[in-house]
Image: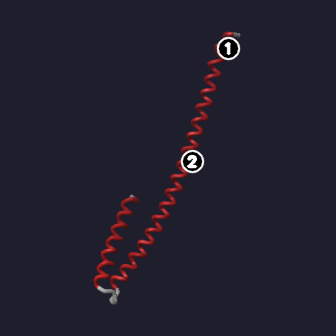
């Protein structure tokens, strides 16, 4: 009986340790999966925001182009609109570089 206890105790400890390790690994995998899902959701939200801002920039660019080419707009306003248009283009190009 004593020999059986000596042999059985390490086996029981090994089984408990293996079960604990398996459970801990499973929990870490679940947490990693949840974190990845959150990151993916945030990425999708940010990409939607970027697309929305790109559309707004394109609309602003078109408006500035129209403003700067209109004959009734004073020259200094047209020049300012052209400068702003160049700034908008730089921002769009910088955003495209960040996407890559």
Horizontal side, residue 36 vs residue 82: left or right: right
Give above or below for 73 relative to 85. Answer: below
Q: In the image, what residue occupies the spot 60% across and 33% down?
A: 22
Res 92 → quadrant: bottom left
Q: Measure how far apart labels 2 and 1 are at the Cα level.
A: 43 Å
> Horizontal and vertical percent for residue 58?
41, 73
* Crowding near the residue tagged with mark 1, few <14, some 14–19, many ≥20 C-alpha atoms within 10 Å: few
* Residue at the spot 36% in from the left edge and 80% down from the top edge: 65
> Which quadrant of the figure contains the N terminus?
top right
Q: Earlier in the sequence, mark 2 or mark 1?
A: 1
Q: Residue furthest right?
A: 1
Q: Residue, x 47% and y 68% (percent of image)?
A: 52
Q: Is residue 95 above or below residue 33?
A: below
Q: Quadrant of residue 64?
A: bottom left
SS of the residue under disc 1:
helix
| Residue on which disc 1 sits | 5
Q: Residue furthest bottom?
A: 72
Q: Position of residue 54 (x, y in %)?
A: 43, 69
User: Which residue is rendered at x = 51% and y = 60% of the image?
Assistant: 45
The answer to which of 22 and 56 lies nearer the viewer is: 56
Q: Nearer the viewer, residue 11 or 91?
A: 91
How far from the left and from the top, in percent, is residue 76? Answer: 28, 82
| Rendered image: mark on residue 65 | none
Picture coordinates of residue 68, whole percent (x, y)? 33, 82
Secondary structure under tag 2 reads helix
Mark 2 Cα shell of 10 Å, populated few (<14), some (14-19), many (≥20): few
Q: Which mark is residue 34?
A: 2
* Residue toward you, 69 or 96: 69
Quarter-of-image position of residue 32:
top right
Q: In the picture shown, does residue 36 fall above or below 12? A: below
């Amino acid at each position: 009986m004593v020999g059986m206890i000596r042999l059985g105790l390490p086996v029981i400890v090994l089984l408990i340790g293996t079960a604990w390790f398996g459970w801990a690994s499973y929990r870490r995998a679940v947490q990693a999966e949840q974190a990845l899902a959150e990151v993916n959701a945030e990425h999708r939200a940010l990409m939607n925001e970027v697309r929305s801002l790109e559309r707004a920039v394109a609309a602003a660019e078109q408006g500035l182009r129209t403003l700067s080419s209109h004959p009734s707009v004073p020259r200094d306003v047209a020049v300012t609109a052209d400068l702003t248009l160049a700034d908008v283009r730089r921002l769009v190009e910088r955003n495209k570089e960040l996407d890559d």
